[in-house]
Image (tube, rainbow, N blue to C red):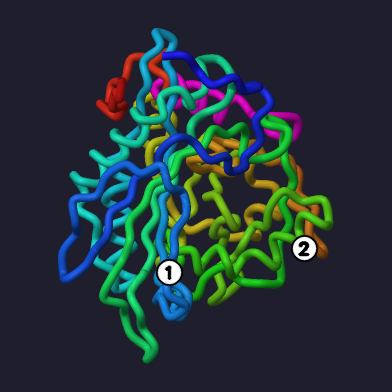
Amino acid sequence: MQKKDLDWGNLSFTYQPTDYSYACNYRNGAWEEGGLTADHNITLSEDAGIYQYCQEIFEGMKAYTTEDGSIVVFRPDLNAQRMADSARRMVMPPFPEDKFVDAVKQVVAANEAWVPPFGSGATLYIRPFMIATGNVLGLGAASEYQFRIFVTPVGPYFKGGEKAVKLTVPAYDRAAPMGTGNIKAGLNYGMSLYPTLQAHDNGYAENLYLDSKSRTYVEETGGTNVLFVDRQGRLVVPQSATDSILPSITRRSLVEVANYLGIEVDERPVRFDEVVAGDFAECGCVGTAAVISPVAKVEAEGVDVTFPDSANGIGPVFGRLRDTLVGIQTCKIDDPFGWVVKIV
């Protein structure tokens, strides 16, 4: 397969249409067959549920080219499961999980030429999403939906790639206690747009959100989970007492990798005053798009915290975790978990 003629090493994290997307409609109480399409546009009624009551959910995944030229994806079953959970919370019909995995395989295989080559530092980003397409005027759920997947080749999520980033603590909240913070719905990210742009304007890569109930505990950034490494070398994974942190597949995988490598893991609520006190040597933004992006420091009014082991780039613990996870994802390392699914 001849790859597209792109400057693979200098791609940004932006959308570029590829050859095919996948589309499937829900009508009359059932999902239709669905299939590949070369049409990347959606035409909807002005009264569609996505416009009126924001019924929308999405996922994020990646496809990789391995050293032997194969193309693989990582744990698509977990994305299928999380999307079904999101759908139920947003009163949308869950897309069948086996059909989800098959659709991912179809659309990646059809866009094989767009999957960045091994060693380029780029990946094929996969965006499954579902929207309410049926008319709905009074407050309620729509009766028709569309599930789609588009793919696009991307570079690093944060500008500068592996360069350590700075975070700030906004005056705003990301998600309400017992709200929708634990699902992947567009409305959560819409809430964070204003403070995110404020952060960017002030020279920060992202916001570090605290729990909205007490503003005492660390939650996550606008687009990623956050992990820490304490002074004793333990991986510290923030937990939410109000169920408002997104269950990141990358975070879950890193915890399993840490256990496999013999790195002690401490999953618990993390007080922000622990961060301010300098209890952590490393900090990282974690997610499908970022994998692990090192955090150099957190700054806010009255707060100036530097993480010594990740101030100038990824630290020793996160470096070991990321190298192992990426090695598994790209098949440079044998997969002891059975996570990698070969496409072609």
Range of residues picked out in magenta? 307-329
**Residue sitting at 71 percent across and 61 percent down?**
169
Residue 338 seen from this side: yes
Tag 2 or tag 1, which sits nearer the N-term? 1
- Drawn side of residue 159 relative to residue 341, left or right: right
User: Badge 2 is on which residue?
Assistant: 198
Q: Nearer the viewer, residue 142 or 275?
A: 142
Mark 1 or mark 2, whichever is nearer to me: 1
Image spot of residue 250 (x, y percent) = 43, 40
| Secondary structure category for the residue under label 1 | loop
Dot 2 crowding, Cα within 10 Å, few <14, some 14–19, many 20+: some
User: Badge 1 is on which residue?
Assistant: 44
- Drawn side of residue 24 relative to residue 227, left or right: left
The amino acid at mark 2 is Gln
What main secondary structure does the magenta stretch of the protein show? helix
Image spot of residue 242 (x, y percent) = 43, 70
- Drawn side of residue 63 relative to residue 166, left or right: left
Image spot of residue 300 (x, y percent) = 78, 60
In the displayed structure, 94 sits above or below 329; it is below
